[in-house]
Amino acid sequence: GRPDAVVSGRVNPTRWRIDARGVLVETRPGADGPGLMPEDAVLELAAAVRRIGVDLRDPVDVEWCWDGDRFWYLQARPITSLAGQHVFSNRLVSDMSPGLIKPLLWSTNTQGMTCNVLGRIFDGLLGPTGLDYGLLARRIHSRLYTDMTLLGDLFVRLGLPPNFFEMMARDETGQRPGFKPSFGRLFAMRRFVPFLWRHGRVDREIREFVVHQNRALEVFRGRNWERTDPADLMIQAGALRDLHAGSQWHIFLAALNSMVRKRMLDRMVRRHAPGVDPADLIRGLAGIKALEPNRRLQELAEMAADLRADQRSCLAEASCEEIERILAADDAGRRLLAGFATFLRDYGFLSANGTDISGESWSETPERIWRLVARHLGSRQLAPGREADRIRRESRREVARALHPAQRRMFTRLLKSTVVYLSLREKVSLLLSEDAFEMRRVFLALGRKLVPAGGLEEAQDVFYLYLEELESLVRGSLPAAEAAELVARRKREMARDAEIQPPDTVCGDRIPAALP
Protein backbone atom coordinates (compact mmCIF):
# COMPACT_ATOMS: atom_id res chain seq x y z
CA GLY A 1 0.00 0.00 0.00
CA ARG A 2 0.90 3.68 -0.01
CA PRO A 3 3.57 4.72 2.50
CA ASP A 4 1.93 7.99 3.46
CA ALA A 5 -0.57 6.16 5.63
CA VAL A 6 2.30 4.70 7.65
CA VAL A 7 4.34 7.90 7.75
CA SER A 8 1.35 9.93 8.92
CA GLY A 9 0.64 7.45 11.67
CA ARG A 10 -2.87 6.57 10.45
CA VAL A 11 -2.04 2.84 10.37
CA ASN A 12 0.33 0.51 12.12
CA PRO A 13 2.48 -1.42 9.62
CA THR A 14 3.21 -5.12 9.74
CA ARG A 15 6.34 -5.90 11.76
CA TRP A 16 8.77 -8.73 11.11
CA ARG A 17 11.72 -9.56 13.38
CA ILE A 18 14.66 -11.63 12.12
CA ASP A 19 17.45 -12.82 14.45
CA ALA A 20 21.18 -12.99 13.77
CA ARG A 21 20.81 -16.47 12.27
CA GLY A 22 18.53 -15.09 9.56
CA VAL A 23 15.49 -16.81 11.10
CA LEU A 24 12.08 -15.11 11.18
CA VAL A 25 11.19 -15.14 14.88
CA GLU A 26 8.21 -12.77 15.01
CA THR A 27 5.44 -11.54 12.71
CA ARG A 28 3.17 -8.82 14.07
CA PRO A 29 0.35 -8.14 11.56
CA GLY A 30 -0.50 -4.51 10.92
CA ALA A 31 -3.59 -2.80 9.62
CA ASP A 32 -3.45 -4.63 6.29
CA GLY A 33 -3.24 -8.02 8.00
CA PRO A 34 -0.69 -10.80 7.55
CA GLY A 35 0.55 -12.14 4.25
CA LEU A 36 1.69 -8.87 2.69
CA MET A 37 4.95 -10.54 1.69
CA PRO A 38 5.96 -14.20 1.67
CA GLU A 39 8.53 -15.29 4.24
CA ASP A 40 11.30 -15.78 1.68
CA ALA A 41 10.88 -12.14 0.58
CA VAL A 42 11.03 -10.95 4.19
CA LEU A 43 14.27 -12.86 4.75
CA GLU A 44 15.71 -11.51 1.49
CA LEU A 45 14.92 -7.98 2.67
CA ALA A 46 16.53 -8.55 6.08
CA ALA A 47 19.72 -9.92 4.49
CA ALA A 48 19.89 -6.92 2.16
CA VAL A 49 19.49 -4.43 5.01
CA ARG A 50 22.26 -6.22 6.92
CA ARG A 51 24.57 -5.88 3.91
CA ILE A 52 23.74 -2.18 3.56
CA GLY A 53 24.55 -1.60 7.24
CA VAL A 54 27.84 -3.47 6.91
CA ASP A 55 28.79 -1.53 3.76
CA LEU A 56 27.96 1.83 5.36
CA ARG A 57 29.55 0.74 8.68
CA ASP A 58 26.64 2.16 10.70
CA PRO A 59 23.20 1.08 11.90
CA VAL A 60 20.82 2.32 9.17
CA ASP A 61 17.22 3.10 8.41
CA VAL A 62 16.44 1.81 4.92
CA GLU A 63 13.48 2.89 2.83
CA TRP A 64 12.38 0.28 0.34
CA CYS A 65 9.44 -0.87 -1.71
CA TRP A 66 8.44 -4.20 -3.20
CA ASP A 67 6.63 -4.60 -6.48
CA GLY A 68 5.58 -8.17 -5.83
CA ASP A 69 8.65 -9.54 -7.58
CA ARG A 70 11.71 -7.56 -6.53
CA PHE A 71 12.81 -4.96 -3.99
CA TRP A 72 13.72 -1.36 -4.76
CA TYR A 73 15.93 0.40 -2.23
CA LEU A 74 15.11 4.11 -2.12
CA GLN A 75 17.21 5.52 0.69
CA ALA A 76 19.57 4.48 3.49
CA ARG A 77 20.59 6.83 6.26
CA PRO A 78 22.40 6.30 9.57
CA ILE A 79 20.30 6.00 12.70
CA THR A 80 21.66 9.14 14.32
CA SER A 81 21.08 7.98 17.89
CA LEU A 82 23.14 4.83 17.16
CA ALA A 83 25.69 6.04 14.60
CA GLY A 84 29.18 5.93 16.00
CA GLN A 85 28.01 4.18 19.17
CA HIS A 86 29.48 0.86 20.16
CA VAL A 87 27.16 -2.05 20.89
CA PHE A 88 27.94 -4.20 23.93
CA SER A 89 26.43 -7.64 24.43
CA ASN A 90 26.61 -10.32 27.12
CA ARG A 91 24.52 -12.82 25.18
CA LEU A 92 27.44 -15.02 24.16
CA VAL A 93 29.74 -14.55 27.14
CA SER A 94 27.36 -14.86 30.09
CA ASP A 95 28.01 -18.61 30.27
CA MET A 96 31.77 -18.03 30.26
CA SER A 97 31.62 -15.59 33.17
CA PRO A 98 28.28 -15.95 34.96
CA GLY A 99 27.24 -13.80 37.87
CA LEU A 100 28.73 -10.62 39.26
CA ILE A 101 32.39 -9.80 38.71
CA LYS A 102 34.27 -7.97 41.43
CA PRO A 103 36.75 -5.28 40.35
CA LEU A 104 39.95 -7.16 41.22
CA LEU A 105 38.75 -10.26 39.36
CA TRP A 106 37.98 -8.02 36.38
CA SER A 107 41.50 -6.55 36.45
CA THR A 108 43.41 -9.79 36.88
CA ASN A 109 41.34 -12.33 34.96
CA THR A 110 38.62 -10.99 32.68
CA GLN A 111 40.56 -8.23 30.96
CA GLY A 112 43.60 -10.48 30.93
CA MET A 113 41.65 -13.07 28.95
CA THR A 114 40.88 -10.57 26.18
CA CYS A 115 44.55 -9.62 25.88
CA ASN A 116 46.09 -13.05 26.45
CA VAL A 117 43.75 -14.92 24.13
CA LEU A 118 41.85 -12.62 21.77
CA GLY A 119 44.84 -10.30 21.44
CA ARG A 120 47.16 -13.14 20.46
CA ILE A 121 44.61 -14.48 18.00
CA PHE A 122 44.04 -11.20 16.17
CA ASP A 123 47.70 -10.21 16.20
CA GLY A 124 48.50 -13.65 14.82
CA LEU A 125 45.97 -13.22 12.01
CA LEU A 126 46.36 -9.51 11.24
CA GLY A 127 49.85 -8.76 12.47
CA PRO A 128 50.42 -6.30 15.32
CA THR A 129 47.40 -3.99 15.39
CA GLY A 130 48.43 -1.75 18.28
CA LEU A 131 44.92 -2.15 19.66
CA ASP A 132 44.27 -2.28 23.41
CA TYR A 133 42.41 -5.60 23.43
CA GLY A 134 41.24 -4.91 26.96
CA LEU A 135 38.66 -2.63 25.31
CA LEU A 136 36.91 -5.72 23.92
CA ALA A 137 35.45 -6.35 27.37
CA ARG A 138 33.36 -4.00 29.47
CA ARG A 139 31.97 -4.35 32.98
CA ILE A 140 28.32 -3.23 33.02
CA HIS A 141 26.18 -3.75 36.11
CA SER A 142 29.06 -5.92 37.37
CA ARG A 143 28.60 -8.32 34.42
CA LEU A 144 30.83 -9.10 31.46
CA TYR A 145 29.86 -7.53 28.14
CA THR A 146 31.70 -7.76 24.83
CA ASP A 147 32.19 -4.79 22.50
CA MET A 148 30.51 -6.33 19.46
CA THR A 149 31.26 -3.26 17.33
CA LEU A 150 35.01 -3.45 17.91
CA LEU A 151 34.99 -7.23 17.56
CA GLY A 152 32.97 -6.96 14.34
CA ASP A 153 35.46 -4.44 12.93
CA LEU A 154 38.30 -6.89 13.56
CA PHE A 155 36.41 -9.66 11.79
CA VAL A 156 35.69 -7.38 8.82
CA ARG A 157 39.43 -6.65 8.58
CA LEU A 158 39.92 -10.40 8.28
CA GLY A 159 37.40 -10.59 5.43
CA LEU A 160 34.77 -12.24 7.64
CA PRO A 161 31.21 -11.16 8.48
CA PRO A 162 31.04 -8.99 11.60
CA ASN A 163 28.86 -11.52 13.43
CA PHE A 164 31.41 -14.31 12.91
CA PHE A 165 31.75 -14.72 16.70
CA GLU A 166 28.05 -15.55 16.97
CA MET A 167 28.24 -17.89 13.99
CA MET A 168 31.05 -19.88 15.59
CA ALA A 169 29.63 -19.83 19.11
CA ARG A 170 26.07 -20.82 18.22
CA ASP A 171 26.31 -21.90 14.62
CA GLU A 172 24.41 -18.81 13.51
CA THR A 173 24.40 -18.04 9.81
CA GLY A 174 23.13 -14.46 9.64
CA GLN A 175 24.99 -12.44 7.02
CA ARG A 176 26.27 -15.65 5.45
CA PRO A 177 23.60 -17.18 3.19
CA GLY A 178 26.13 -19.60 1.80
CA PHE A 179 29.73 -19.76 0.65
CA LYS A 180 30.41 -17.51 -2.30
CA PRO A 181 33.99 -16.96 -3.44
CA SER A 182 35.09 -13.39 -2.79
CA PHE A 183 38.30 -11.49 -2.25
CA GLY A 184 37.43 -11.04 1.43
CA ARG A 185 36.89 -14.75 2.01
CA LEU A 186 40.03 -15.67 0.10
CA PHE A 187 41.94 -13.14 2.23
CA ALA A 188 40.48 -14.70 5.37
CA MET A 189 41.47 -18.18 4.24
CA ARG A 190 45.01 -16.96 3.49
CA ARG A 191 45.22 -15.75 7.09
CA PHE A 192 43.42 -18.62 8.80
CA VAL A 193 45.06 -21.60 7.14
CA PRO A 194 48.62 -20.79 8.36
CA PHE A 195 47.24 -19.86 11.81
CA LEU A 196 45.38 -23.15 12.15
CA TRP A 197 48.37 -25.06 10.78
CA ARG A 198 50.68 -23.48 13.39
CA HIS A 199 48.29 -24.16 16.26
CA GLY A 200 46.62 -27.33 15.01
CA ARG A 201 49.20 -29.80 16.27
CA VAL A 202 50.36 -28.48 19.60
CA ASP A 203 49.85 -31.49 21.87
CA ARG A 204 53.58 -31.63 22.61
CA GLU A 205 53.67 -27.90 23.37
CA ILE A 206 50.72 -28.21 25.77
CA ARG A 207 52.26 -31.23 27.51
CA GLU A 208 55.50 -29.31 28.01
CA PHE A 209 53.52 -26.34 29.31
CA VAL A 210 51.74 -28.53 31.88
CA VAL A 211 55.08 -29.81 33.19
CA HIS A 212 56.62 -26.33 33.28
CA GLN A 213 53.56 -24.76 34.92
CA ASN A 214 53.47 -27.40 37.64
CA ARG A 215 57.12 -26.68 38.45
CA ALA A 216 56.48 -22.93 38.51
CA LEU A 217 53.49 -23.33 40.84
CA GLU A 218 55.53 -25.41 43.28
CA VAL A 219 57.13 -22.17 44.51
CA PHE A 220 53.70 -20.91 45.61
CA ARG A 221 52.01 -24.08 46.90
CA GLY A 222 51.54 -24.03 50.65
CA ARG A 223 53.72 -20.95 51.10
CA ASN A 224 52.96 -18.80 54.14
CA TRP A 225 52.64 -15.17 53.05
CA GLU A 226 52.02 -13.62 56.46
CA ARG A 227 55.58 -12.32 56.85
CA THR A 228 55.81 -10.93 53.31
CA ASP A 229 55.52 -7.16 53.00
CA PRO A 230 52.77 -5.65 50.79
CA ALA A 231 55.13 -4.48 48.01
CA ASP A 232 56.56 -7.98 47.63
CA LEU A 233 53.07 -9.47 47.70
CA MET A 234 52.19 -7.30 44.69
CA ILE A 235 55.27 -8.66 42.92
CA GLN A 236 54.21 -12.22 43.69
CA ALA A 237 50.70 -11.49 42.43
CA GLY A 238 52.21 -10.16 39.20
CA ALA A 239 54.20 -13.38 38.75
CA LEU A 240 51.04 -15.42 39.24
CA ARG A 241 49.19 -13.24 36.71
CA ASP A 242 51.90 -14.10 34.18
CA LEU A 243 51.48 -17.80 34.93
CA HIS A 244 47.70 -17.41 34.63
CA ALA A 245 48.11 -15.78 31.21
CA GLY A 246 49.97 -18.87 30.01
CA SER A 247 47.18 -21.12 31.27
CA GLN A 248 44.54 -18.98 29.53
CA TRP A 249 46.35 -19.26 26.20
CA HIS A 250 47.02 -22.99 26.42
CA ILE A 251 43.48 -23.89 27.47
CA PHE A 252 42.34 -22.01 24.37
CA LEU A 253 44.73 -24.08 22.23
CA ALA A 254 43.51 -27.33 23.78
CA ALA A 255 39.84 -26.33 23.46
CA LEU A 256 40.31 -25.18 19.84
CA ASN A 257 41.95 -28.43 18.82
CA SER A 258 39.44 -30.63 20.61
CA MET A 259 36.52 -28.63 19.14
CA VAL A 260 37.82 -28.82 15.54
CA ARG A 261 38.52 -32.53 15.78
CA LYS A 262 35.17 -33.19 17.46
CA ARG A 263 33.34 -31.44 14.62
CA MET A 264 35.26 -33.49 12.05
CA LEU A 265 34.34 -36.67 13.92
CA ASP A 266 30.69 -35.62 14.07
CA ARG A 267 30.56 -35.06 10.31
CA MET A 268 32.18 -38.42 9.61
CA VAL A 269 29.75 -40.25 11.90
CA ARG A 270 26.66 -38.49 10.53
CA ARG A 271 27.71 -39.31 6.99
CA HIS A 272 28.79 -42.94 7.37
CA ALA A 273 27.05 -44.18 10.54
CA PRO A 274 23.92 -42.04 11.02
CA GLY A 275 22.55 -44.45 13.62
CA VAL A 276 25.34 -43.59 16.07
CA ASP A 277 25.21 -40.57 18.34
CA PRO A 278 28.61 -38.83 17.86
CA ALA A 279 28.62 -37.86 21.54
CA ASP A 280 28.79 -41.56 22.46
CA LEU A 281 32.32 -41.79 21.00
CA ILE A 282 33.69 -39.74 23.90
CA ARG A 283 30.98 -40.35 26.50
CA GLY A 284 32.38 -39.89 29.98
CA LEU A 285 35.48 -38.10 28.67
CA ALA A 286 34.08 -34.63 27.98
CA GLY A 287 31.93 -32.11 29.79
CA ILE A 288 33.56 -32.61 33.21
CA LYS A 289 35.78 -29.76 34.24
CA ALA A 290 38.33 -32.00 35.94
CA LEU A 291 38.22 -35.75 35.43
CA GLU A 292 40.77 -36.77 38.05
CA PRO A 293 39.11 -34.86 40.94
CA ASN A 294 35.81 -36.39 39.87
CA ARG A 295 37.33 -39.87 40.06
CA ARG A 296 38.74 -39.12 43.50
CA LEU A 297 35.36 -37.89 44.72
CA GLN A 298 33.93 -41.12 43.40
CA GLU A 299 36.41 -43.04 45.57
CA LEU A 300 35.37 -41.00 48.63
CA ALA A 301 31.70 -41.79 47.95
CA GLU A 302 32.53 -45.49 47.65
CA MET A 303 34.44 -45.36 50.96
CA ALA A 304 31.47 -43.62 52.57
CA ALA A 305 29.25 -46.54 51.55
CA ASP A 306 31.02 -48.63 54.26
CA LEU A 307 29.99 -46.27 57.06
CA ARG A 308 27.22 -46.83 59.56
CA ALA A 309 23.88 -45.19 58.80
CA ASP A 310 24.36 -42.47 61.42
CA GLN A 311 27.83 -41.67 60.05
CA ARG A 312 26.52 -41.41 56.48
CA SER A 313 23.73 -39.07 57.56
CA CYS A 314 26.10 -36.73 59.39
CA LEU A 315 27.96 -36.03 56.09
CA ALA A 316 24.90 -34.20 54.77
CA GLU A 317 24.18 -31.95 57.74
CA ALA A 318 26.88 -31.78 60.41
CA SER A 319 29.72 -29.30 60.73
CA CYS A 320 33.26 -30.34 59.83
CA GLU A 321 34.21 -30.61 63.48
CA GLU A 322 31.22 -32.85 64.23
CA ILE A 323 31.88 -35.02 61.14
CA GLU A 324 35.50 -35.52 62.18
CA ARG A 325 34.44 -36.49 65.71
CA ILE A 326 31.85 -39.01 64.51
CA LEU A 327 34.06 -40.57 61.82
CA ALA A 328 37.06 -40.90 64.11
CA ALA A 329 35.15 -43.47 66.18
CA ASP A 330 36.00 -46.49 63.99
CA ASP A 331 38.36 -47.73 61.27
CA ALA A 332 35.99 -47.11 58.32
CA GLY A 333 35.46 -43.52 59.40
CA ARG A 334 39.18 -42.93 59.93
CA ARG A 335 39.94 -44.27 56.44
CA LEU A 336 37.44 -41.82 54.96
CA LEU A 337 38.94 -38.95 56.98
CA ALA A 338 42.40 -39.80 55.66
CA GLY A 339 41.09 -39.95 52.09
CA PHE A 340 39.30 -36.66 52.57
CA ALA A 341 42.47 -34.97 53.86
CA THR A 342 44.43 -36.24 50.87
CA PHE A 343 41.74 -34.97 48.51
CA LEU A 344 41.82 -31.49 50.04
CA ARG A 345 45.62 -31.44 49.86
CA ASP A 346 45.53 -32.30 46.15
CA TYR A 347 42.38 -30.47 45.00
CA GLY A 348 41.46 -27.97 47.69
CA PHE A 349 42.22 -25.19 45.20
CA LEU A 350 39.04 -25.97 43.24
CA SER A 351 35.88 -23.94 43.71
CA ALA A 352 32.41 -23.44 42.26
CA ASN A 353 33.95 -21.14 39.63
CA GLY A 354 37.57 -22.16 39.33
CA THR A 355 38.97 -18.88 38.00
CA ASP A 356 37.05 -16.54 40.31
CA ILE A 357 39.71 -15.36 42.76
CA SER A 358 37.02 -13.60 44.81
CA GLY A 359 35.17 -16.87 45.53
CA GLU A 360 35.95 -19.30 48.33
CA SER A 361 37.84 -22.47 47.47
CA TRP A 362 37.02 -25.99 48.62
CA SER A 363 39.85 -25.87 51.14
CA GLU A 364 38.15 -22.85 52.75
CA THR A 365 34.72 -24.50 52.79
CA PRO A 366 35.31 -28.24 53.27
CA GLU A 367 31.66 -28.73 54.28
CA ARG A 368 30.80 -28.42 50.58
CA ILE A 369 32.89 -31.50 49.81
CA TRP A 370 31.22 -33.51 52.56
CA ARG A 371 27.82 -32.46 51.20
CA LEU A 372 28.90 -33.44 47.69
CA VAL A 373 30.02 -36.87 48.88
CA ALA A 374 26.74 -37.35 50.77
CA ARG A 375 24.60 -36.26 47.81
CA HIS A 376 26.36 -38.50 45.34
CA LEU A 377 26.36 -41.36 47.82
CA GLY A 378 22.58 -41.17 47.90
CA SER A 379 21.99 -40.58 44.19
CA ARG A 380 24.76 -42.84 42.91
CA GLN A 381 25.73 -40.10 40.45
CA LEU A 382 29.37 -40.90 41.08
CA ALA A 383 28.95 -44.60 40.38
CA PRO A 384 31.81 -46.19 38.36
CA GLY A 385 31.79 -45.28 34.68
CA ARG A 386 31.47 -48.84 33.37
CA GLU A 387 28.31 -47.97 31.45
CA ALA A 388 30.03 -45.04 29.75
CA ASP A 389 32.95 -47.33 28.85
CA ARG A 390 30.57 -49.84 27.29
CA ILE A 391 28.76 -47.17 25.25
CA ARG A 392 32.07 -45.80 23.97
CA ARG A 393 33.31 -49.22 22.89
CA GLU A 394 30.08 -50.19 21.14
CA SER A 395 29.65 -46.88 19.29
CA ARG A 396 33.26 -46.93 18.10
CA ARG A 397 32.90 -50.49 16.82
CA GLU A 398 29.70 -49.59 14.98
CA VAL A 399 31.30 -46.61 13.26
CA ALA A 400 34.40 -48.64 12.34
CA ARG A 401 32.23 -51.34 10.72
CA ALA A 402 30.62 -48.69 8.49
CA LEU A 403 33.97 -47.45 7.12
CA HIS A 404 36.30 -48.88 4.53
CA PRO A 405 39.94 -49.49 5.64
CA ALA A 406 41.34 -46.08 4.65
CA GLN A 407 38.44 -44.28 6.33
CA ARG A 408 38.81 -46.50 9.38
CA ARG A 409 42.46 -45.51 9.78
CA MET A 410 41.51 -41.84 9.48
CA PHE A 411 38.70 -42.30 12.01
CA THR A 412 41.02 -44.06 14.49
CA ARG A 413 43.65 -41.33 14.27
CA LEU A 414 41.09 -38.54 14.52
CA LEU A 415 39.38 -40.14 17.52
CA LYS A 416 42.70 -40.70 19.27
CA SER A 417 43.82 -37.09 18.80
CA THR A 418 40.40 -35.82 19.95
CA VAL A 419 40.71 -37.78 23.20
CA VAL A 420 44.28 -36.50 23.65
CA TYR A 421 43.20 -32.86 23.40
CA LEU A 422 40.21 -33.44 25.68
CA SER A 423 42.58 -34.81 28.29
CA LEU A 424 45.01 -31.91 27.83
CA ARG A 425 42.14 -29.43 28.14
CA GLU A 426 41.21 -30.97 31.51
CA LYS A 427 44.80 -30.80 32.74
CA VAL A 428 45.21 -27.14 31.78
CA SER A 429 41.81 -26.41 33.32
CA LEU A 430 43.13 -27.66 36.65
CA LEU A 431 46.20 -25.46 36.32
CA LEU A 432 44.00 -22.48 35.49
CA SER A 433 42.07 -23.06 38.72
CA GLU A 434 45.24 -23.50 40.74
CA ASP A 435 46.76 -20.29 39.33
CA ALA A 436 43.64 -18.43 40.48
CA PHE A 437 43.69 -20.10 43.90
CA GLU A 438 47.31 -19.11 44.56
CA MET A 439 46.53 -15.57 43.39
CA ARG A 440 43.61 -15.48 45.83
CA ARG A 441 45.89 -16.53 48.69
CA VAL A 442 48.36 -13.77 47.88
CA PHE A 443 45.65 -11.10 47.60
CA LEU A 444 44.01 -12.20 50.84
CA ALA A 445 47.38 -12.01 52.61
CA LEU A 446 47.77 -8.51 51.16
CA GLY A 447 44.27 -7.63 52.35
CA ARG A 448 45.14 -8.69 55.90
CA LYS A 449 48.21 -6.46 55.76
CA LEU A 450 46.12 -3.47 54.65
CA VAL A 451 43.37 -3.77 57.29
CA PRO A 452 45.33 -2.14 60.16
CA ALA A 453 46.01 0.96 58.02
CA GLY A 454 42.27 1.54 57.62
CA GLY A 455 42.05 1.10 53.85
CA LEU A 456 40.07 -2.11 54.27
CA GLU A 457 37.71 -3.30 57.00
CA GLU A 458 38.44 -6.96 56.27
CA ALA A 459 40.80 -8.89 54.00
CA GLN A 460 37.99 -9.80 51.56
CA ASP A 461 37.53 -6.10 50.76
CA VAL A 462 40.64 -6.28 48.60
CA PHE A 463 38.50 -7.74 45.80
CA TYR A 464 36.43 -4.53 45.55
CA LEU A 465 39.42 -2.54 44.28
CA TYR A 466 40.73 -2.57 40.72
CA LEU A 467 44.34 -3.69 40.39
CA GLU A 468 45.66 -0.20 39.69
CA GLU A 469 43.82 1.11 42.77
CA LEU A 470 45.28 -1.65 44.90
CA GLU A 471 48.76 -0.85 43.61
CA SER A 472 48.22 2.82 44.48
CA LEU A 473 47.04 1.90 47.97
CA VAL A 474 50.16 -0.20 48.54
CA ARG A 475 52.42 2.61 47.25
CA GLY A 476 50.62 5.14 49.42
CA SER A 477 49.42 7.34 46.56
CA LEU A 478 45.81 6.32 47.31
CA PRO A 479 44.84 7.45 50.83
CA ALA A 480 43.40 4.75 53.06
CA ALA A 481 40.21 6.73 53.70
CA GLU A 482 39.64 7.13 49.95
CA ALA A 483 40.19 3.40 49.41
CA ALA A 484 37.70 2.61 52.17
CA GLU A 485 35.11 4.86 50.50
CA LEU A 486 35.71 3.14 47.13
CA VAL A 487 35.15 -0.26 48.72
CA ALA A 488 31.96 0.87 50.46
CA ARG A 489 30.60 2.37 47.24
CA ARG A 490 31.42 -0.76 45.23
CA LYS A 491 29.66 -2.94 47.78
CA ARG A 492 26.54 -0.81 47.47
CA GLU A 493 26.73 -0.87 43.67
CA MET A 494 27.14 -4.65 43.51
CA ALA A 495 24.28 -5.14 45.97
CA ARG A 496 22.05 -3.12 43.64
CA ASP A 497 23.39 -4.96 40.58
CA ALA A 498 22.52 -8.29 42.19
CA GLU A 499 18.86 -7.24 42.35
CA ILE A 500 18.46 -6.37 38.66
CA GLN A 501 18.25 -8.23 35.39
CA PRO A 502 20.40 -6.22 32.96
CA PRO A 503 19.66 -6.14 29.21
CA ASP A 504 21.40 -8.50 26.82
CA THR A 505 22.54 -5.57 24.69
CA VAL A 506 23.63 -2.03 25.53
CA CYS A 507 24.28 0.68 22.93
CA GLY A 508 26.76 3.45 23.67
CA ASP A 509 27.40 4.90 27.08
CA ARG A 510 23.78 5.21 28.16
CA ILE A 511 23.58 2.32 30.60
CA PRO A 512 20.00 1.48 31.63
CA ALA A 513 19.54 1.25 35.37
CA ALA A 514 17.55 -1.99 35.29
CA LEU A 515 14.94 -4.03 33.51
CA PRO A 516 11.53 -4.64 35.07
Image (spheres, rainbow, N blue to C red):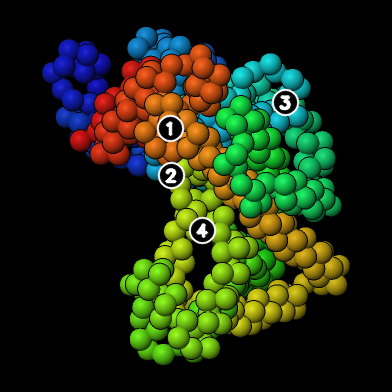
Mark 1, residue position? 451
Q: Secondary structure at mark 3?
A: helix
Instruction: Give how far apart the Cα atoms at labels 3 and 2 are.
Output: 28 Å
x and y, in percent, of residue 440 in the image: 54, 43
Neighbourhood count class around disc 2 (C-alpha, 10 Å): few under 14, some 14–19, many 20 upward: few
Which residue lies at the image location 41% right of the left edge and 35% below the top edge?
461
CA neighbours of label 1 inside 10 A, class few (<14), some (14 to 19), many (20+): some
Residue depth check, mark 2 versus mark 1: number of the one nearer the observer: 1
> Amino acid under label 1?
Val
Q: What residue type is disc 3 on?
A: Asp
Q: Secondary structure at mark 1?
A: loop
- Which residue is identified by label 2? 98
Q: Is residue 174 visible?
A: no
The residue identified by callout 3 is: 123
The mark nearer the N terminus, 4 or 1, is: 4
In the rendering, which numbered label is found on residue 363?
A: 4
Task: Relative to 96, say whether 430 is above or below.
Answer: below
Counting from the top left corner in percent of width and height, residue 178 is at 60, 39
